[in-house]
């Protein structure tokens, strides 16, 4: 028996013990003699069983229907759904969405700042039938990115937080509290959100917090003296030390890192010659990235797979130890791989230009001499990434929806790549 009240927005969490691995369970709640719909979950596979994850991010209610989530809910073969952030968006109606979809406009009808605002916004998203259905059918493992707080958030501020909106620390703490109320994570707003799971003997999942735990303010560009400083931190010292401890102590074959922003170096010079690097991604924190690359390289760690959200686009990278050597040498030293998941609905380039124009830009990214480690990019389609891992290989496959603006949408399988055990080399999956 559990009780709840307005202090936690009438939300309830039950941490059930004594469950068997690799087992499907069904559950429901009863309140005043009324029953909830029956939910389904599945415990981690354990043993040497394979793992199959659906990786998603960027679920903007205003930009379209959550058809991808409905299609995910119909799958019966998933270990879990990883949501890598931007579960909600903080903007007011019409600020960052499709204004023609009147029934999808944000509530409350302004940018969210107060605790009541954030609670109303989460309730709106969770009233969506497709969001309800996918939570009803699959266990979720979640992490926040920036829009759960405010755009381009870091520990001491955010690009989208204005002085007239009050104290940022109060807003951040409110956002943290409501996230812990509404999302299936243990602890409360005083807990650290970065954490790890052994899904099987083969697979360890490490979820990072690249926003609130330790991130320092983004610099404007590479001319800023702080850009290459060791004081520019994405994770912060405490989380960084925790991460390297997890990696060095792992007995798993595959180490999957749930990562909010792109880890690999990536030149956007084909689109923006003046600002070719994204300062909100790991490219804005090169010293800390180098420390992590050094640790992986010197420790001879293998089978590290970054899965990444944030950009609304699909990516596949071989993560080089040194991108300059990777460009100029036939002996390319690769320390990890990275797969980026597209948005569920949030805008990518298809919202601004024709499909042919987007494909031309994609080809430019792949031809850019600064991006020799980039093996796949899709900036047009919305959907999710499936990551399958067993004792022999990891396989990344992208699935895309045919339409965001109608609930009558299908889904299709697109690109697929594989990484053999201990190879760190991405090859096209021809199966």
Image (cartoon, grey):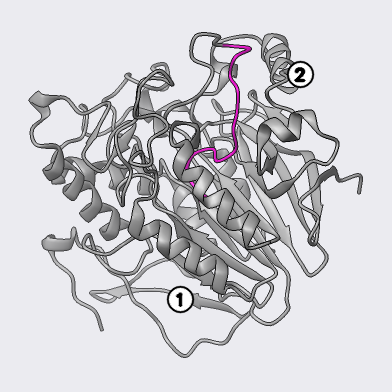
Q: Which secondary structure type mostly characterizes the magenta part of the structure?
A: loop
Residue range highlighted in magenta: 259-271
Q: Secondary structure at mark 2?
A: helix
**Which residue, given by chain and number where applicable, does mark 2 sit on?**
367
Residue 124 is situated, as x and y percent measured from the top left of the image, at 31, 42
Say above or below: 137 vs 357: below
Location of residue 254 (image quadrant): bottom right
Q: Secondary structure at mark 1?
A: strand
**Which residue, given by chain and number where applicable, does mark 1 sit on?**
27
Q: Toward the viewer: 276 or 309?
A: 276
Say above or below: 403 vs 32: above
Residue 196 is situated, as x and y percent measured from the top left of the image, at 48, 67
Q: Is residue 41 left or right of residue 231?
A: right
Residue 376 is situated, as x and y percent measured from the top left of the image, at 74, 32
Sequence-first disc among 1 and 2: 1
Location of residue 312 (image quadrant): top right
At label 1, counting other C-alpha atoms closer than 10 Å, the crowd grade (few under 14, some 14-19, many 20 or more) is few
Furthest residue in direction bottom, as rendered: 18
At label 2, counting other C-alpha atoms closer than 10 Å, the crowd grade (few under 14, some 14-19, many 20 or more) is few
Q: Toward the viewer: 91 or 429?
A: 429
Q: Is residue 216 left or right of residue 166?
A: right
**Is 365 contained in the magenta span?**
no
- Name the residue: 75% across, 45% down: 333
Q: Is residue 234 left or right of residue 271?
A: left
């Amino acid at each position: 028996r559990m009780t709840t009240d307005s202090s936690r927005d009438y939300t309830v969490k039950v941490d059930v013990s004594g469950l068997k691995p690799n087992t499907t369970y069904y559950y429901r709640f009863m309140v005043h003699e009324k029953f909830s719909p029956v939910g389904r979950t599945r415990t981690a596979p354990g043993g040497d069983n394979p793992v199959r994850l659906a990786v998603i991010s960027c679920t903007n209610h205003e930009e379209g229907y959550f058809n991808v989530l409905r299609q995910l809910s119909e799958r019966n073969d998933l270990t879990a759904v990883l949501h890598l952030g931007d579960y909600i968006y903080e903007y007011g109606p019409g600020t960052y969405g499709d204004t023609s979809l009147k029934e999808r406009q944000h509530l409350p009808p302004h940018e969210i700042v107060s605790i009541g605002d954030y609670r109303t916004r989460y309730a709106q998203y969770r009233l969506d039938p497709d969001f309800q259905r996918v939570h009803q059918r699959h266990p979720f493992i979640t992490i926040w990115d920036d829009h759960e707080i405010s755009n381009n958030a870091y520990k001491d501020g955010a690009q989208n937080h204005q002085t007239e909106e009050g104290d940022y620390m109060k807003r951040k703490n409110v956002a943290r509290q409501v996230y812990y109320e509404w999302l299936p994570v243990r602890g409360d707003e005083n807990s650290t959100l970065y954490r790890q799971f052994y899904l099987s003997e083969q697979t360890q999942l490490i979820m990072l917090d690249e926003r609130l735990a330790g991130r320092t303010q983004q610099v404007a560009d590479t001319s800023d003296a702080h850009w290459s400083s060791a004081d520019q931190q994405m994770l912060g010292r405490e989380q960084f030390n925790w991460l390297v401890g997890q990696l060095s102590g792992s007995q798993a074959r595959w180490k999957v890192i749930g990562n909010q922003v792109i880890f690999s170096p990536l030149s956007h010079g084909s689109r923006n010659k003046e600002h070719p690097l994204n300062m909100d991604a790991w490219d804005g924190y090169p010293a800390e990235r180098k420390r992590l690359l050094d640790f992986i390289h010197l420790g001879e760690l293998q089978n590290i797979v970054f899965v990444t959200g944030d950009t609304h686009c699909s990516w596949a990278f071989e993560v080089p130890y040194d991108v300059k050597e990777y460009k100029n040498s036939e002996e390319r030293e690769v320390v990890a791989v990275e797969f980026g998941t597209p948005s569920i609905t949030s805008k990518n380039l298809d919202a601004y230009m024709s499909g042919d124009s987007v494909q031309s830009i994609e080809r430019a990214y792949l031809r850019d001499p600064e991006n020799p480690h980039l093996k796949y990019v899709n900036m047009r389609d919305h959907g999710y990434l499936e990551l399958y891992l067993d004792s022999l290989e990891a396989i990344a496959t992208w699935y895309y929806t045919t339409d965001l603006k109608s609930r009558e949408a299908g889904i299709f399988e697109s690109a697929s790549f594989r990484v053999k055990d201990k190879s760190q080399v991405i090859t096209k999956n021809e199966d």
